Image (cartoon, rainbow, N blue to C red):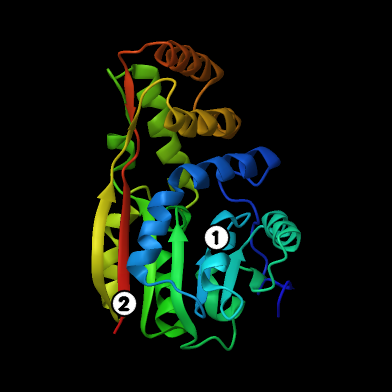
Amino acid sequence: MPGTTAQPPSNHPAEYVLGTSADESVRLGLQHRLWSASAHQLWEKAGVRPGQTVLDIGCGPGHATLDLAQIVGPTGRVIGVDESAAFLKQLNDQAQARKFQNIDRVLGDVQELDAALPGHEDSIDVVYARWVFCFLSKPEEVVRGLSRMVKPGGRVAVQDYFNYERALTLAPRREAFTKVIQAVGASWRARGGDTDIMGKLPGMLVANGFRIDHLDVVQRIARPGSTMWYWPNSFWQSFVPRLVEMGFITAEDEKAFEQEWAAASQDPATFIQLPPVYELVATRI
């Protein structure tokens, strides 16, 4: 039903490891804008077009959901699924402000899609997931659910990480920076996530009746003062204090990191190699 929010099938923690605060929502908005060109190119490869039903899993506050709703138009639908009621409210507020009538919001666990979306077997044209699988403890359960919901010939489009902790680095390398990146990976794994998930996802999809049609990587760097420099900068501001709170680094580690990042931000000879974003499009056979 347009504009409604289904209830979750069971009790799950609604806050993922990066949090669901207002600051995190702002960070996600910046992140979407900086990566929107890559997302749209992937949607074109997946064949997103007017009239389709698109499932946006782990939609968060819905930055991609709103873009997809514009593409599928009034004769199509976008279903956004997320565990955060706060994020889904933000999506609803934006959809109402922009007078979108083709977005459904579902409060639920993407690892239990059958329970979150009953009656949707063979009904989805395209599924989109960006930086979702890397946070999940049961990614194959998501793939199994998608194998039942995606129409034969329908597609799954994913953007996610592989080689995150080794590839994400400042140049030249700095010890305090490397320590924090390793802590980021450890914090995700502590909640069942996997920073190397894109190395495993193609096999999961093939095992569940999909064919891999597209597999590539987007590797970017950023220099101080560039627009893309503000993507990792916004992440540090949001998440490094949480690493201290969760016990993955000390306050001294945080201070050393901040000093190194501040020095790098003023150094025209340095750059950051951003985490490579792997992308795939798979078709249900």
| Rendered location of residue 248, percent (x, y) | 49, 31
Picture layout, residue 242 above or below residue 255: below
Whether residue 248 is visible here, answered yes or no, is: no
Left-right relation of 278 to 100 = left
Picture layout, residue 18 above or below residue 156: above
- Whether the residues at callouts 1 and 2 have beta carbons within 8 Å, the answer is no
Q: What element carries label 2?
A: strand
Q: Residue drawn 59% across and 28% down? A: 241
Whether residue 270 is visible here, answered yes or no, is: yes
Amino acid at circle 2:
Thr
Residues packed near mark 2 inside 10 Å, few (<14), some (14 to 19) or many (20 plus): many
Mark 2 lies on residue: 283
- Give the quadrant of the N terminus: bottom right
Q: Earlier in the sequence, mark 1 or mark 2?
A: 1
| Rendered location of residue 141, percent (x, y) | 44, 72
Q: Residue drawn 44% across and 17% down? A: 261
Mark 1 vs mark 2: in front: 1
Residues packed near mark 1 inside 10 Å, few (<14), some (14 to 19) or many (20 plus): some
**Residue 9 placement: quadrant:** bottom right
Left-right relation of 202 to 99 = left
Mark 1 lies on residue: 67
Amino acid at circle 1:
Asp
Q: Nearer the viewer, residue 251 or 71?
A: 71
Q: Which of 17 and 69 is in front in this view?
A: 69
Q: Distance between the residues labelled 1 and 2?
A: 22 Å
Q: Residue drawn 72% across and 62% down? A: 92
